[in-house]
Image (tube, rainbow, N blue to C red):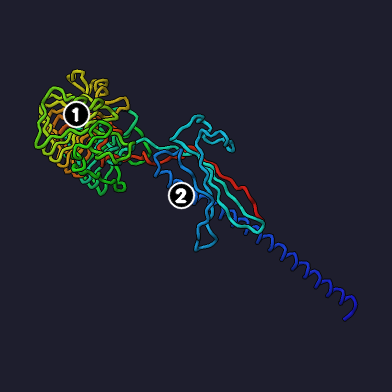
């Protein structure tokens, strides 16, 4: 081999070694980057685990401000390194926390709010990586209606509409939807019928609806369409029987039973009527229905009227105050009866007087009165009802019926002829236990931020 050839070979080897060294260095940098990313990801996952456990703690507490947090804790993890995090809890009124200024909108002690600082840790070659989540949570106290009660008409099985049907929303800004868990039927439905909402069903339709369904709030979906199942209502009237005349805070405990229930539950007064009951008196005063109860019939303390049998409404009856009937049997509202919640005289044509319609509702546009039966509810011809109606087996309306409220059943709904329904939802705070779907023990996110603090190596 000549001298020049030797130099060339040595140069090639040297260049190859340099290239190989460069490759090794590049691989090391990539490996370090991957490791750092993995550490950061693990720290964030640990912080989020700590946050989820803290939220579970909060849901179980009556007073958010007394939550002590969780000390730095290491939990064994069979799939990899231990899960390690810390939860520091402070009330919103603690002004020492200014980074970031989440929850700063509240400057006074507020037991319904709390902020959490959750730190997740991950081991690293040069120390540890930390990821911090700052969040503010508030107690959620707004009751939610069950899905079945958010509609003008709901039936767990079939809905049959006949004759002239006019269903409108009192608010004018919400849909008055109709839902059939199985089949939505039109039998002799007049072409001029109108529903200010969607028509939905679980399995199919029959008959001709034409342009009946015209939602006020148009989401772009078909006005008449099939949707996923809507859960039926869980209702057992035995839940509302008197609990041994127990007393809570000087008042009958009613449906909430003995005083062992959390103090956050108000006592709901209970009036019991054994056997069948017919009501035809001009006024049913919920305020004085339960003896010795000074604030009965209010939104905070609605009266539960328990009828252990069948209930009949016959004549003109005005209900004063918030009240719901719990009936173990059937309910019949006789022909041309009037069941209203306003003292204003019933106009000749209630539908032509929107102010009178609204006068039967509270300030939130919700019903004062609810009738919940284990059996069937029948509204006979010409009757007018201002209430939320729920029948366990069925709801049926005859010709010329007017309803201010909504109708629901786990069975079937049918109107035999003309129906005017002015949709107003049930009073959210005045639902009987068992139909109530509250999130009073839940929390909602008021503010949230997170970032990486440590970098490791």
Q: Residues within 10 Å of mark 2 (few under 14, many from 20)?
A: few
- Give the position of the C terminus as an image quadrant: bottom right
Residue drawn 78% across and 67% down? 18
Residue drawn 38% across and 39% down? 220
Tell whether 5 sits left or right of 413: right
Q: Which quarter of the figure has residue 291?
A: top left
Q: Secondary structure at mark 1?
A: loop
Farthest residue to the right: give it. 3
Residue 109's disc is none
The residue tagged 2 is: 53
Residue drawn 68% across and 63% down? 27
Tell whether 252 sits left or right of 228: left
Return the residue nearer the eye: 378 or 127: 127
From the top left corner, tell me how far across and down residue 31 is, in percent. 65, 61
Q: Do labels 1 and 2 touch, CB within 8 Å?
A: no
The residue tagged 1 is: 290
Q: Is residue 283 above or below residue 200?
A: above
């Amino acid at each position: 081999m000549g001298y020049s050839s030797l130099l060339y070979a040595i140069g090639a080897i040297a260049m190859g070694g340099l290239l190989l060294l460069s490759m090794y260095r590049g691989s090391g940098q990539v490996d370090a980057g991957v490791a750092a990313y993995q550490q950061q990801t693990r720290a964030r996952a640990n912080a989020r685990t700590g946050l989820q456990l803290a939220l579970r703690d909060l849901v179980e507490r009556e007073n958010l401000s007394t939550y002590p947090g969780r000390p730095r804790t290491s939990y064994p993890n069979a799939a990899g390194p231990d899960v390690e995090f810390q939860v520091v809890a402070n009330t919103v009124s603690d002004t020492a926390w200014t980074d970031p200024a989440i929850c700063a909108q509240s400057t006074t002690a507020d037991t319904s709010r709390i902020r959490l600082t959750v730190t997740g840790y991950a081991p690293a070659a040069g120390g540890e990586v930390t990821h911090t989540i700052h969040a503010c949570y508030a107690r959620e106290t707004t009751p939610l209606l069950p899905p079945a009660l958010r509609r003008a008409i709901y039936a767990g099985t079939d809905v049959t509409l006949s004759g002239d049907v006019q269903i409108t929303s009192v608010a004018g800004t919400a849909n008055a939807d109709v839902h059939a868990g199985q089949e939505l039927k039109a039998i002799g439905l007049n072409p001029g019928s109108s529903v200010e909402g969607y028509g939905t069903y679980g399995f199919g339709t029959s008959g001709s609806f034409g342009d009946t369904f015209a939602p006020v709030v148009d989401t772009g979906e078909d006005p008449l369409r099939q949707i996923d199942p809507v859960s039926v209502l869980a209702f057992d009237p035995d839940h509302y029987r008197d609990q041994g005349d127990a007393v809570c805070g000087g008042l009958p405990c009613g449906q909430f039973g003995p005083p062992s229930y959390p103090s956050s539950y108000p006592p709901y007064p209970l009036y019991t009527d054994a056997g069948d009951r017919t009501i035809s008196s001009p006024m049913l005063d919920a305020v004085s229905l339960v003896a010795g109860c000074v604030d009965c019939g209010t939104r905070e303390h609605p009266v539960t009227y328990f009828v252990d049998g069948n209930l009949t409404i016959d004549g003109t009856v005005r209900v004063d105050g918030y009240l719901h009937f719990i009936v173990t049997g059937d309910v019949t509202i006789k022909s041309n009866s009037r069941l209203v919640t306003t003292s204003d005289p019933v106009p000749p044509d209630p539908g032509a007087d929107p102010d009178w319609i609204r006068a039967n509702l509270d300030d939130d546009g919700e019903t004062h009165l609810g009738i919940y039966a284990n059996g069937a509810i029948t509204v006979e011809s010409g009757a007018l009802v201002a209430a939320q109606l729920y029948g366990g087996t069925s709801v049926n309306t005859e010709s010329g019926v007017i309803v201010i409220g909504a109708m629901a059943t786990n069975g079937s709904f049918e109107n035999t002829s003309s129906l005017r329904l002015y949709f107003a939802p049930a009073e959210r705070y005045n639902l009987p236990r068992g139909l109530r779907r509250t999130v009073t023990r839940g929390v909602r996110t008021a503010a949230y931020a997170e970032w990486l603090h440590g970098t490791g190596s």
